[in-house]
Amino acid sequence: MHKIPNPQTPQTNSLLITPNVPLADKNWFGTGGSAKFYCEPADAHQFQQAILYANTHQLEIFILGQGANILISDEGFDGLVIRPMLTNITTLSLNETTALIKADAGVTMPNLIDHCLNNNLLGLEEFSGIPGTVGGSVYINLHYFEFLLANFVIAAEVVHKKNGSLATVDAQWFKFGYNDSELHKKDYFLVNATFKLMLATDEQTAFAKGRKTEIIRHRAHRYPQVRTCGSFFRNFFPHEVTLEVDNKKIIFVAYYLDKIGVKGTLKSGNAIVSPQHANMIVNLGNATSTDIITLAREMQKLVQEKFGILPQAECQLIGFKNFPLL
């Protein structure tokens, strides 16, 4: 283990870097090998220390949240895994109609949603029941039906990969898209984000809390809740497909996966396509990441053979020496 002292608070705020840390218990699939090095910074200064440690030792960096949208190679990750444990939520401003809430990268979305509802702040409850941290959710521009997290982000603090410097950016900096943001370039990592939310009456909040419960119930009925990354493949972009129904392009990858009949039947080892949703793969208990990749490749192959289009991963593939899909 390595302790990296913080120059601002030398003896009380050092960052612990630990070698050979298993990652299978730190992601929703429950698969994958170990991190060569691992740390859990508790504040922005420790986050900076972690970045500088990686640079000094020429280590690749992976930022891990709750591990809800990732698949880690069975060989693990040959670098430094940083799991931010920054968990502060702060009200920056408040008026008669809106509030600005700053949440650290390590805050879970369920906890942030509860905090907002308990303070009569509405908007984020649309993402109820989706696992993940603020860091991961901003990274992928979390979405559910027509709701996008980008609609609420107005500013953020990020740390630079090369020198550990902190910068404050606005929403435009992120260049948000579907499953996309500037963070995908991996030149910067999120430290915290500021959200603009609506200040509600007690009655409006009670309705929103009921809506949260209904969204969670709906998701539990439609989607598997354990040992999955959620949607494995992203939806197609309109220019990628030709099939139309009622003059609308069919972009939903689950539509094509349903048509080839893989739901609840197609398996590889201990990985299976969920019987609840054709675009979700489930670890039946002791699947490997190799099982999951083999199954995903077969899903790609079947869709390509029948429809001439190739599904692309939405799930983040971590630690693979070579791109493992078709």
Image (cartoon, rainbow, N blue to C red):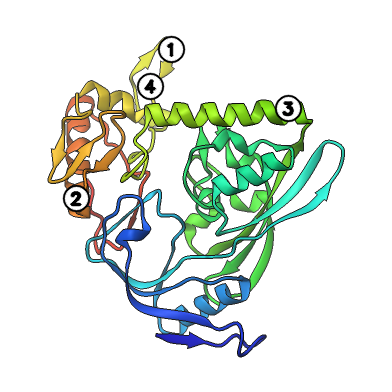
**Viewer-nearest residue: 57 or 76:** 76
Q: Is residue 145 visible?
A: no
Q: Identify the mark nearer the N-term, 1 or 2.
A: 1
Q: Which mark is residue 247?
A: 1
Find residue 54 and report its horizontal and vertical position in percent.
45, 78
Q: Is residue 200 left or right of residue 315?
A: right
Left or right: where 215 falls relative to 2: right
Q: Is residue 154 visible?
A: yes
Asked if labels 2 and 1 touch by Cβ distance under 8 angstroms, the answer is no
Task: Using residue 157 as the reference point, say whether residue 69 is left or right of it.
Answer: left
Q: Relative to the observer, which residue lies in front, 310 or 56? A: 56
Q: Nearer the viewer, residue 118 or 281?
A: 118
- Please give the residue where the numbered disc 4 appears in the rendered image: 250
Which of the marked residues, 3 or 4, is nearer the chain's N terminus?
A: 3
Instruction: Determine the CA span between mark 2 and mark 4.
Output: 32 Å
| First of labels 2, 3 by sequence position | 3
Query: Which residue type carries mark 1?
Result: Asn
Looking at marks 2 and 4 on the same chain, the residue that comes earlier in the sequence is marked by: 4
Which marked residue is nearer to the observer: mark 1 or mark 2? 2
Q: Residue at x 18, y 53 (%)?
A: 290
* CA distance for labels 3 and 4: 36 Å
Query: Tag 3: Cα neighbours inside 10 Å, few (<14), some, or many (≥20)?
Result: some
Answer above or below: position of 40 versus 30: below
Q: Amino acid at mark 2?
A: Ala
Name which residue type carries label 3: Gln
Mark 2 or 4, which is nearer the eye? 2
Residue where numbered disc 3 is placed: 204
Element under label 3?
A: helix
From what the image shows, is residue 291 above or below residue 251? below
Instruction: Report the amino acid beneath label 4.
Output: Ile
> Which residue is label 2 attached to?
287
* Residue 100: x %, y % from top left: 76, 48
